[in-house]
Amino acid sequence: MTARDSGGVMRSMLVTTALATIAAVVLMETPAMPQVDATSGNYMLPLCQAFLRMQSQDMATITNELSTGGARSGGIPLSMMQAGMCAGEVIGIAEMLKGGDQAPRACIPKEVTEEQLVRVVVASVEKDPTNMHEDFGTLAAAAIIVAWPCAK
């Protein structure tokens, strides 16, 4: 190896070391972002509340919800999609609890609307916020079973 080659290798090693040091300092100085549990009541409740606000039939409320992006940032499509995630999960859980081929775990009258289902779940989760860190599906199922128990 010539002196010229060893100078290039040394320069490359110095640059690599400097970049690694800078990266380490940046990573140490950057606060850790908290993990968001997208299955928890903490995450889903604001989405359900946004869904209910959009069901209000009040043009000012709906316009405000759409202009602010709702419970999460990202603009109109994202907020609407996320609000729909809540409604979809609640409706799916309600259908599952009706039993299908198995004995029902909840006896939900046919007249109950999708909005009513979401309202019952939201009211239940808001009533006991100490459980909001728990799985939203479990919280929603419990709320629906309590609201519409089957006769024994």
Image (cartoon, helix red, strand yellow):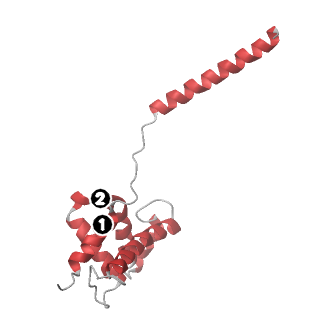
Horizontal and vertical percent position of residue 81:
48, 69
Q: Quick check: 23 left or right of 63?
A: right
Instruction: List x then y, in percent, for residue 66.
Output: 46, 70
Q: Quadrant of the C terminus?
A: bottom left
Quarter of the figure that contains the N terminus: top right
Q: Mark 2 points at which residue?
A: 134
Categorize mark 1 by other alpha carbons within 10 Å: few (<14), some (14-19), many (20+): few
Element type where label 2 sits in the image: loop
Above/below status of 52 relative to 6: below
Percent position of residue 95, x then y: 37, 80
Mark 2 touches mark 1? (CB < 8 Å): yes
Amino acid carrying label 2: it is Glu
Left or right of 145? Residue 99 is right
Q: Give the label on residue 62, or none.
A: none
Q: Is residue 64 left or right of residue 13?
A: left
Which one is nearer the viewer's eye here, 70 or 64?
70
Q: Which residue lies furthest to the bottom in this view?
A: 111
Residue farthest to the top? 3
**Structural distance between the alpha carbons of marks 2 and 1:** 8 Å
Total residue callouts:
2
Looking at this view, is 20 or 59 the one in front? 20
Quarter assignment of residue 61: bottom left
In the depicted view, which residue is nearer to us: 73 or 64? 73
- Tag 1: amino acid: Thr
Which residue corresponds to mark 1?
138
Q: Residue at x 76, y 17 (%)?
A: 8
Q: In which quarter of the image is residue 96?
A: bottom left
In the picture, residue 59 is in which quadrant? Answer: bottom left
Q: Is residue 26 above or below residue 34?
A: above
Query: Residue at (31%, 87%) from the top-left corner?
Result: 112
